[in-house]
Image (cartoon, rainbow, N blue to C red):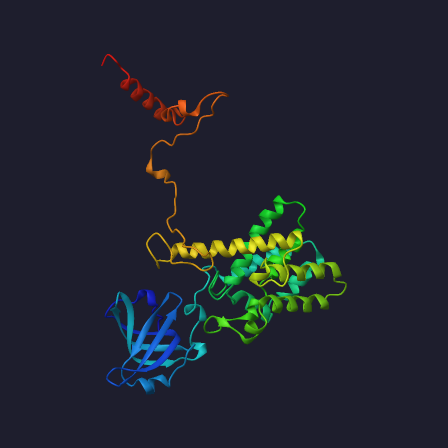
Amino acid sequence: MKKLFIKDFKEKQRVDTTLLVTRKTLGVSKAGKPYLALRLMDSSGELDARVWDNAESIAEGFKVDDVARVKGSALAYQGKMQLNLGSIKAVDSGEYTLRDYLPASERDPLEMMAELDAIIAGIKDPFIKGLLSTMLAVGSELRAKFMQAPAAKMMHHPYLGGLLEHVLSLCGLGAAVGGHYKSLNKDLLLAGLILHDIGKVFELSYERSFGYTDEGRLIGHITIGTELVDSYMKKIPGFPAELRMQLKHLLLSHHGTLEYGSPKRPKTLEAIVLSYLDDLDAKVNAAETLMDDPAGEERWSPYQRIFERYIYKERYRYDASAGGCAPEPCLLEEGEDSEAVPPDTLSGDEPCQEEAAKERAAEFDLFK
């Protein structure tokens, strides 16, 4: 059966497809008849659904977080698409691909991982290179989880492959900053950028829907990640004690402040840079997502807790195809008054300058 995505549903269309169940409530109508209220989703969106007939027996065929085959019809209700279902039943895990049902990075995970492998291969410090190569070894469970995990449940990069996409973005930022600040230990910074959120592969659950594991709720990704990295460092013969301490500090301090969950505030140059770059990339990704989201007003996003403000969604872009002459500012000689220079005397394209001169001459022609 070919997958039909939510974004392609049309009103009054007969629907026979598979969707992920994210909410399931058995209620009773005003007439005293049981019904099912559902929330369903796939990678293209989500919507509400109702089962009005045989609700109790149908409810036994699936549970929350199941991918289920649904049959029914689409209709518009209060301006939104909704499904009226006559049948819904869970399907086996081997019959679907998870990326069809959860938000996912637009980039291919294998392609992103190959890019990260190349970055690790370029590291000069043998201990850092060995640590990263061992932890993310081809065929390892950790590598597979690292390729699939989101970077967060909601705030930034909240989609499959989001953690890896976030890490690659940070590596690009780290290369730019490392080229500017020569005193940075670039290999140490890269290690922090790659490993700072490694604990999220165990903090978050992302097999059927996004949530938190028991370990994630009780311990958190900072502690999980620090313990995980430390366990690998202990296995590498001769791993320098100073490097081990500074790497652990990078992970423990990357949230920047105590109130944001860091047990320690950044106290090394690399830790300071890591903290700022992590915050920058997270916020830019969140802002870009908001600007592309149709929710809210046309020009403004809904109120955002991560920013504690609304985000303006309109983007300015210079349109070179629109034509016209863009004036270039002219430099004033010392002592000249900028207000004495008429705006239309600014230097620019020569034909436009000549045309403007003719117009000014016509304005002041006393004999016309």
Q: Residue at x 36, y 81 (%)?
A: 89
Vertical placement of residue 322 versus 66, above or below: above
| Image position of 141 (left or right of 63) | right
* Identity of the residue furthest to the bottom in this view: 57
* Identity of the residue furthest to the right in this view: 238
Query: Residue 54 in the image: x percent, y percent?
Result: 29, 86
Question: 45 and 29: which one is in front?
Answer: 29
Quarter occupied by residue 340: top left
Which quadrant of the figure contains the N terminus? bottom left
Quarter occupied by residue 292: bottom left
Q: Residue at x 25, y 82 (%)?
A: 30
Question: 77 and 126: which one is in front?
Answer: 77
Quarter occupied by residue 232: bottom right
Query: Residue 189 in the image: x percent, y percent?
Result: 64, 54
Vertical placement of residue 140 versus 278, above or below: below
Q: Residue at x 44, y 54 (%)?
A: 287
Q: Residue at x 40, y 58 (%)?
A: 303
* Identity of the residue furthest to the top in this view: 367
**Count of marks, rendered view:** 0
Query: Residue 228 in the image: x percent, y percent?
Result: 64, 69
Which quadrant of the figure contains the C terminus? top left
Residue 122 at least partly seen:
no
Query: Residue 46 in the image: x percent, y percent?
Result: 36, 68
Residue 98 at least partly seen:
yes
